[in-house]
Image (spheres, helix red, strand yellow):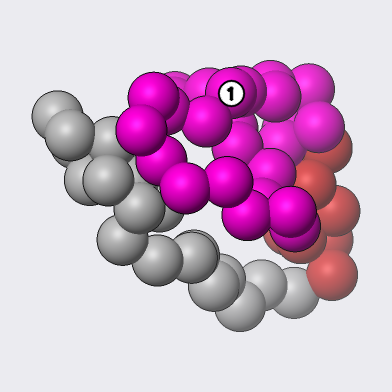
Amino acid sequence: MAERGTGRYVGSAFVTLNREMRERLWKRVQEHPGTAPKGVMKRPATQWVKPG
């Protein structure tokens, strides 16, 4: 998660879902890859997603 406006890293997101919803969410994440905002520290396991 990044702070709006500054792009400063503020933490990771954790969402608890059932299997069906998790699979639907993961499919959407894979279809909309994004890039890290400028000035954000790079974390190897982070997967950025386009807003929306």
Expressed as whole percent of the image width and height from the top left, the position of residue 5 reads: 14, 29
Q: Residue at x 69, y 44 (%)?
A: 47
Which amino acid type is marked by label 1?
Thr
Horizontally, residue 34 falls left or right of residue 31, namely left
**Count of marks, rendered view:** 1
Q: Which one is in front, 35 or 14?
A: 35
Question: Over which residues does the magenta segment extend?
Answer: 28-52
Give residue 29's position: percent from left, percent from top: 71, 36
Looking at the rendered structure, the secondary structure element under dot 1 is loop
Above or below 46: residue 48 = above
Q: Residue furthest left?
A: 5
Place of residue 12 in the rendered image (x, y in percent of width and height, measured from the top left): 48, 65
Q: Name the foreground residue: 26 vs 40.
A: 40
Within-10-Å neighbours for mark 1: few <14, some 14–19, many 20+: few
Residue 25 seen in render: no
Any part of residue 2 in sight: yes
Using the rendered view, name the quadrant where residue 35 is placed. top right
Q: Nearer the viewer, residue 5 or 31?
A: 5
The residue at 17%/34% (across/down) is 6
Residue at numbered disc 1: 35
